[in-house]
Image (cartoon, helix red, strand yellow):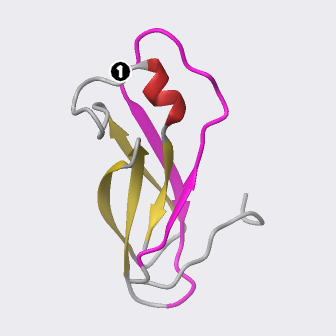
Amino acid sequence: DDATYVESTAGDGAVDLYTHSTTLSGDVTGIRVDVRASLTDAGTDDFGLVVESNGSTTEKGLTLGVGSPGWYHETVEDDPDTGVTWSASAANGATFGVTS
């Protein structure tokens, strides 16, 4: 909802990470991060969707533009720590978020 949010300054490099609310089991074919983001001023701004596993991260760079807010998505099929398909244990310990 629009009342609960993280605010950051462009380029500050802050990473705001969250855990997921479900315990996974069995095969994990990927982790999808969904973020609703918007600008508080005119122009454009770069940000990234981040998945972190055991200290290793992967990031997809995106640009916010005029007409935000909008939904932004990234699916990470391989664990950034191991480079292979996620194990349920690794997926349960992973964190997700945004960087500016």
Q: Which residues are magenta?
A: 13-41
Residue 45 placement, left or right of 60: right
Residue at horizontal 53%, vertical 90%? Answer: 41
Relative image position of residue 67 (x, y in whole percent): 48, 74
Query: In the figure, 46 relative to 50: above or below?
Result: below
Crowding around mark 1 (Cα neighbors within 10 Å: few <14, some 14 to 19, many 20+) is some
Return the residue nearer the eye: 92 or 37: 92
Q: Residue at x 40, y 11 (%)?
A: 27
Q: Quadrant of the N terminus?
A: bottom right
User: What residue is at 30 percent from the left and 31 percent from the top?
Assistant: 77
In the foreground, 28 or 93: 93
Quick check: is 15 in the magenta stretch?
A: yes
In this rendering, the answer to whether 56 lies above or below 60 is above
Q: Residue at x 39, y 76 (%)?
A: 65
From the image, tell me which residue sits under label 1.
Answer: 29
The amino acid beneath tag 1 is Thr
Q: Viewed as shown, does residue 50 lie left or right of 4?
A: left
Instruction: State the image coordinates of residue 19 (x, y, percent, origin top left).
Output: 60, 43
Determine whether, in the image, residue 9 is placed left or right of residue 76: right
Q: Position of residue 99 (x, y in %)?
A: 43, 67
Vertical comparison of 36 with 74: above or below: below
